[in-house]
Image: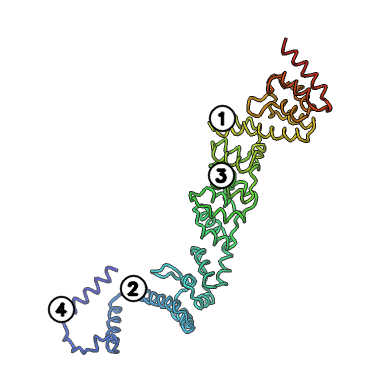
Amino acid sequence: MESAIQSVHEQVSRSLEAPAPVPELSRDVFDLKSELCEQHLRQVFELVRSLLPEGPAYFGMFGAESQHSSLLELFRSIDLDTTEHQAHIRQLVAQTGISIHRVHPVLGVRPIEHAILHGRRRSVRTLMALGASIASDADHVQLYHAALQYGLDEVASELSAWARSPAARLELFASAHSGDTRRCGLLLHMKANANWRDETGMSVLEWAMTSDNRECGVEEMLLPLADDAAKQSALQICALHGLTTRLYILLDAKCDPSSRDDDGWTPLDWAILHGQEMFALELLRLAGPAVAHACHRSTKALARAARNRHLWQLAELLEFEPLATAQAAFRKILEDGTEEGLLELLLQGNFPLNPQSDFGHPLDACVEGGRPDLALQLLRWQAQPSLASGGSLSLLARARAMPQRSGHIELVNMLLILRERESL
């Protein structure tokens, strides 16, 4: 190329050494609209071409300029979008050989993408008839939104097929993790699978849960479409990371807070293991004692584990909860229960026979409730009359004043025997 330029330079230099007489120039020579000006420009163009060596490397630059001009003309016709310009688009493609897949030098889009994004309906159909297709590296989600906006149903249908591809799968994971509600919603509208999982087994919903975005818009969008497995794994992810704000929408979506994973662990187990006290407290408040009972270990063991991790408030609640549950069960047995029901409660190990709290002694409740049969059962399990309200003497007096029922005499006799043993 440098030698060609040097050759042209030498020829121009020789012509300058022997100048020819300057012809008279009319005004038409400088008028760009005149035929004379056009003729002179063509002569200059041919002169320059004649000075360049023959070969595709030099003539290609003129072809490239022509192609560039045809490409711009193609985009101009697409934008005008009239019936006449559709014929011009076909003519450009047929006569100039311009590719309908070329990218605009400034806009960076292909003709079909430009037509879709700007709602040029006639041009879209013309380009599709000429064989244009949406490139794999195009933004399919943005194009789908434009197709819906401008009523390009055939384009929207073609893009919906893309929504089942691996590329769409990656797009959905990325939009879920970034909290991009709009993009995620469009992908789901395109029928992307809301229950896709990545190589590690994490679901789209789990990716949304671990997003740094504090808004829950993506999760609320995914939950109605998520299966039970995705919901339960998302709940466990929330327990691991202490995502209390996400807990509310998961429970509203009917996630089972007592569910177990493959290792038998519940969300409460995972929350305690990772020291997520606020999440565990809120889970117990919203879902009730059944959450603790569903764990793979006893409530006492859970309370001990919570204390080992310095979760004092949770440990206190876990220790109190079995007692409160047992007290409620005991009150129900006092009303219409049987000795067998009381025996079952005592076997569970959570009901205190001699409580050191403000609940009152169970022997007092049995005597006041007129249930000598239940009081006898408690005495056989080593309940101590001396710890009852007013001591054993007061309890004996109240037992004697009870209405005559089955077991009444036996209860009074047993209290007398125990009273004598105390005085020894």
Where residue 292 sits: x, y (%)? 64, 37
Residue for badge 3: 238
Q: Of callouts 1 and 2, which one flags the residue occurring earlier in the amino acid sequence?
A: 2
Quadrant assignment, res 270: top right
Residue for badge 2: 58
Question: Disc 3 vs disc 1: which is toward the camera?
Answer: 1
**What is the basis of the colouring in this image?**
rainbow
The circle on residue 307 is: 1
Quadrant assignment, res 63: bottom left
Q: Of callouts 3 and 1, which one flags the residue occurring earlier in the amino acid sequence?
A: 3
Alpha carbon of mark 3 to alpha carbon of mark 4: how far? Answer: 87 Å
Alpha carbon of mark 1 to alpha carbon of mark 4: how far? Answer: 103 Å
Amino acid type indicated by mark 1: Arg
Residue for badge 4: 17
Q: Is residue 392 left or right of residue 186?
A: right
Q: Is residue 167 left or right of residue 227?
A: left
Amino acid type indicated by mark 3: Cys
Identify the residue shown where x is 76% and y is 35%.
Answer: 335
Instruction: Give the secondary structure at mark 1.
Output: helix
- Mark 2 crowd level (few <14, some 14–19, many ≥20, 10 Å Cα): some
Q: Of callouts 3 and 4, which one flags the residue occurring earlier in the amino acid sequence?
A: 4
Identify the residue shown where x is 15% and y is 81%.
Answer: 18
118 relative to 84, above or below: above
